[in-house]
Image (tube, rainbow, N blue to C red):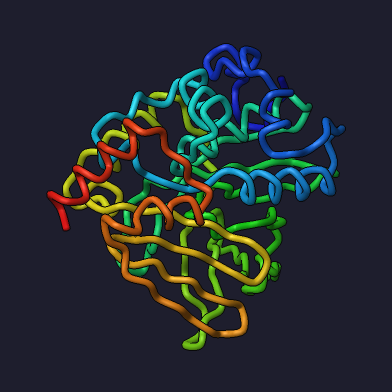
């Protein structure tokens, strides 16, 4: 498969040819398409709306790693969700199999608050234009963003902006207080071992936001749902915010409402973890 200029082809290293693309497309409810900007937008939206962002395997200490067959088996075969590495690695493999040019890179989250450089992003070329594709950013990005200084993108009802300073790109979200910087990146290509290192920190370090609390996020047009810790927050694009306490009693119902369906053993393990942490 082809890659963007400046990255040595590592198709075998990423093992993309082993992916069952048709099974993935059935999972997200999308037909097979030829590479184009319109197809990239449609695929990105379908992926984000179909596959939840969640860290359940991380908090249960049973994450099986980032090998593509493991990720696909979980997100496609078992119809579970995952966090940024799982989403982005899977989506990158799909795009390359469909003929898109993809560069796997990394961003620093909340750089104005000394955030970590651990978030996986994709830079994808379509119709001659490079796009930021961010399917694993807490379900916050529904569409690709063209890498053009000052570009404004409506993400399901929330305005986002891409800016450039030299080699550095910044993604920001408009809030009532102004522009909130989400992350910044320079597009440097990464290798599988790099994500193993990032994943190790994010999934094991006590200061990681994904290590000691449940995080599930879903995005659709005009509504952003975030279960973080013991609170479900539903934010509407018109400014309305609803908060619901999460308990052991309503945990399964709330997870199902976020499209996270666990088998009996997984649910029992999560409830046991919940009762010891809450």
Q: Position of residue 113 (x, y in %)?
A: 31, 68
Q: Position of residue 173 (x, y in %)?
A: 55, 72
37 horizontally vs 5: left or right:
right
| Residue situated in front as seen by the camera: 46 or 206 | 46
214 horizontally vs 176: left or right:
left
| Residue situated in front as seen by the camera: 189 or 98 | 98
Give the residue displayed 48% in from the left and 48% down from the top: 53
Q: Indicate whether 169 appears above or below 74.
A: below
Q: Indicate whether 222 appears above or below 109.
A: below
- Can residue 201 be seen in this snapshot? no
Quadrant including the C terminus? bottom left
Give the residue displayed 69% in from the left and 47% down from the top: 44
Q: Position of residue 27 (x, y in %)?
A: 66, 34
Give the residue displayed 57% in from the left and 43% down from the top: 51
Q: Say which quarter of the image contains residue 19.
A: top right
- Can residue 109 be seen in this snapshot? yes
| Residue situated in front as seen by the camera: 210 or 199 | 210
Q: Position of residue 144 (x, y in %)?
A: 69, 53
Q: Say which quarter of the image contains residue 232.
A: bottom left
Give the residue displayed 61% in from the left and 78% down from the top: 237
């Amino acid at each position: 498969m082809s890659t963007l200029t400046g990255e040595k082809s590592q198709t075998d290293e990423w093992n993309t040819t082993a992916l069952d693309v048709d099974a993935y497309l059935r999972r997200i409810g999308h037909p097979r398409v030829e590479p184009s900007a319109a197809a990239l937008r449609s695929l990105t939206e379908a992926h984000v709306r179909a596959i939840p962002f969640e860290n359940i395997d991380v908090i249960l200490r049973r994450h099986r790693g980032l090998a593509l067959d493991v990720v696909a088996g979980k997100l496609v075969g078992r119809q579970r969700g995952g966090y940024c590495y799982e989403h982005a690695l899977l989506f990158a493999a799909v795009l390359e199999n469909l003929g898109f040019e993809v560069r796997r890179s990394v961003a620093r989250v909340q750089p104005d608050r000394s955030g970590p450089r651990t978030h996986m992003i994709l830079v994808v070329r379509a119709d001659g234009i490079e796009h930021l594709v961010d399917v694993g950013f807490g379900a916050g990005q529904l569409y690709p963003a063209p890498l053009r200084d000052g570009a404004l993108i409506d993400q399901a009802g929330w305005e986002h902006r891409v800016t450039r300073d030299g080699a550095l790109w910044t993604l920001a979200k408009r809030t009532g207080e102004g522009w909130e910087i989400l992350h910044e990146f320079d597009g440097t290509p990464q290798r599988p071992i790099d994500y193993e290192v990032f994943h190790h920190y994010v999934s094991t370090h006590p200061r990681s936001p994904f290590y000691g609390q449940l995080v599930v996020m879903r995005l659709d047009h005009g509504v952003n749902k975030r279960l973080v810790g013991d609170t479900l927050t539903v934010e509407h694009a018109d400014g309305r915010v609803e908060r619901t306490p999460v308990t052991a009693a309503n945990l399964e119902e709330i997870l199902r409402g976020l499209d996270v369906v666990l088998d009996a053993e997984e649910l029992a393990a999560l409830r046991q973890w919940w009762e010891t942490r809450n």
